[in-house]
Image (cartoon, coloured by chain):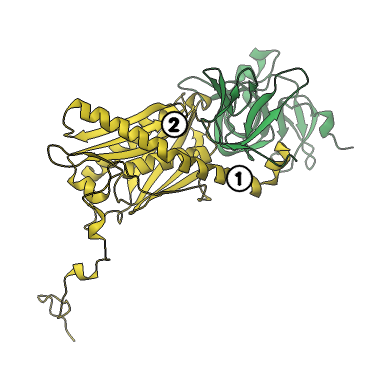
Chain colours: A green, B yellow
Amino acid sequence: MAPPVRYCVPGERLCSLEEGAAGSGTYTRHGYVCAALAGCLVKTSEDGALPVVSVVRDAESQLLPDVGAIVTCKVCSINSRFAKVHILYIGSTPLKSAFRGTIRREDIRATEKDKVEVYKSFRPGDIVLAKVISLGDMQSNYLLSTAENELGVVVAHSEAGAQMVPISWCEMQCPRTHSKELRKVARVQPEFLQT
Amino acid sequence: MALDHRRVPGPEESQAPLLYAAPGEAGTDAPGREAAALRPLLARAGLLSQAEGSAYVELAGGTKVLCAVRGPREAAEGRGRLLCEFRRAPFSVRGARPRPGPATAARERELGLALQEALAPAVRLARYPRARLELTALVLQDGGSALAAALSAAALALADAGVEMFDLVVGCGLCRAPGPGGAWLLQPSEAEERAAAARLTVALMPGLNQVAGLLGSGQGGPPESWAQAVRLGLEGCQRLYPVLRRSLLRAAERRAAEGPRAVGASA
């Protein structure tokens, strides 16, 4: 650990643009890199390139869902056109307050979009991995998509109340009653497999 | 024993309340004070555990403002918004309590809007789409220049909450002494403010050297007088900035010392 850690406040000039590039927590103005956060200053230099100047805080408390981010959400209601979800995590960072999102029917899977039915893909209470495709316009909220193999339902409970086991990309089975239920199942990543 | 309701049940002897006033309380508004003198300022950031960010600013002579920031939360509208609320505690003013009612609420709303207008240029709201930041400034004691103290405290609280900002905001209050040749006084006390012919609050972004907000009222005399007042106020803001900056740095250091993850990331 480098002993002299420099702290800075918003608006403080850190260096000129020739000396470093603006990283996270900074902005550029009049050819200078200025701090946008109150935190400690970090310079990461790669060989040959300009050092990247950024300001970091201990907790990424101010994270907001962004386009392209993978989020973990919980389905709270479904109808024939879309499923409404609450966004709980962005990547692996928990959100302090839940944001609402919508998964439309045509964004549930990538192929045969016209044959998708929402109630055969999600049920209220499911935990779903999804990707943010739009921040939405004035009326709608965050638009999410599960149209990738790795996205979809990761945790679901059967009608008997047991946690179900995925058996194919579109089916899950209850270990207690052995009944099968339809879901848009996310392919389990190999690094998460327990062997 | 039955109580006689027609009788005032007070003590038999009574004394004037002035006997119990603290010595020197009436003499705070010394007439021959220096116009550009600033009241000593105390600032602390990050003292509330419930809010994401908080700050407390106290001016010597009894102005105490506590500020808290919550958010970002989900907003109904598409753009990022900053919502400011300015409230006075019922015990904040000396004398009779302000009666809660539409007039008091309208005045507080007006000051909340002034806060919002002055702080909005300093916050990078474009970084917060579909979210709102809620800011509450609570005046615990109003000893003059309460809005200016609230402005400084609000900027500290926003920075403490980790909201991305272009710059801090420093507020400074002024008032013009009554009379034809009244001079502008920096950071007036409550008595000076009550007697003043005109009042002005200036907000400055000191790093960028831009004026963030201006709120004035009253009869300030010729336009040159107002221009001089603004210059004086901006100068006062620049002199207050190092104090606020130091308090924010101290809060950042304290937070880094508490969270070992930050040290690991910075090493």
Q: Is residue A172 visible?
A: yes
Q: Residue at x 38, y 29 (%)?
A: B212
Q: Is residue B94 visible?
A: no
Residue A171, relative to residue B35: is it above or below?
above
Residue B69, relative to residue A19: is it above or below?
below
**Splitting the image into 4 quarters, where does residue A106 fall?**
top right
Q: Is residue A62 left or right of residue B150?
A: right
The residue lying toward the viewer, choosing from B88 and B32, is B32
The residue lying toward the viewer, choosing from A158 and A191, is A191
Q: Is residue A40 left or right of residue B240?
A: right
* Earlier-in-chain disc, 2 versus 1: 2
Under tag 1, what secondary structure? Answer: helix
x and y, in percent, of residue B28 in the image: 26, 55
- The three-letter code of the residue at mark 1 reads Glu
x and y, in percent, of residue A99 in the image: 55, 33
**Residue B15 numbered tag:** none
**Residue B253 numbered tag:** 1
Disc 2 packing (10 Å; few <14; some 14–19; many ≥20): many
Under tag 2, what secondary structure? Answer: loop
Which residue is the site of mark 2? B206
x and y, in percent, of residue B24 in the image: 26, 62
- The three-letter code of the residue at mark 2 reads Pro
Whether pointer 2 and pointer 1 mark residues with C-beta atoms closer than 8 Å, the reply is: no
The residue most toward the bottom is B1
Q: Chain of mark 2?
A: B
Disc 1 packing (10 Å; few <14; some 14–19; many ≥20): some
Q: Residue at x 31, y 34 (%)?
A: B232
Residue B7, relative to residue A19: is it above or below?
below
State the quadrant of the C terminus of chain A: top right
x and y, in percent, of residue A103 in the image: 60, 24
Q: Residue at x 64, y 29 (%)?
A: A54
Q: Residue at x 70, y 46 (%)?
A: B260
